[in-house]
Amino acid sequence: MVIEDEELLRESILDILKTGGFTAVSAENGRKGLDLASEFVPELILCDVRMPELDGYEVLKALRQDPVLENILLIFLTAETQQNVQRQGEILGANAYLIKPFTKAQLLEVINQVIRDR
């Protein structure tokens, strides 16, 4: 699943996932993303940190507090390079971070690594 408020980036990520052999759905904000996660219970979520409605941290908190969704893998996508941003996600239970902009190879590599590490 992809939760990203920038439409072009969201569509690009979906294309990358499709060519990488993944099936994915997407949402344009955190609230809609949580609704979709409850409906589909994906294995992994790629989630922007800064978004309207609910930001990525709020999405992650909600996932980790829901017994059905708590084990979903989550990779944050962010333009933030400051360690305090990454540390906040680690504290909440993010599985990885990917700094924007990223390449197709970088995205698929971090996804496959997180899945292998599970």
Image: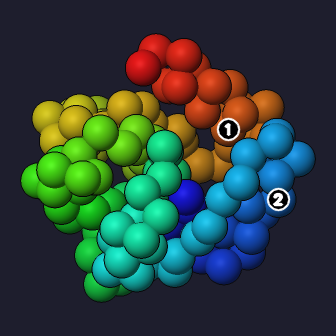
Left or right, residue 39 beside residue 22: left
- Label total for image: 2
Q: Nearer the viewer, mark 2 or mark 1?
A: 2
Vertical placement of residue 114 versus 38, above or below: above
For label 2, the residue is 15
The kind of residue tagged 1 is Leu
Disc 2 or 1, which lies upstream in sequence? 2
Q: Residue at x 40, y 39 (%)?
A: 73
Can you tell which quarter of the image residue 111 is in?
top right
Local crowd size for mark 2, using a 10 Å CA cut-off: few (<14), some (14–19), many (≥20) = some
Q: Residues within 10 Å of mark 1 (few under 14, many from 20)?
A: some
In the picture, the disc for residue 107 is 1
Q: Is residue 60 above or below residue 21?
A: below
CA separation in Å, label 2 and label 1: 12 Å
Secondary-structure class at tag 1:
helix
Q: From the top left corner, tell me how far across and down residue 39 is, in percent.
A: 42, 71
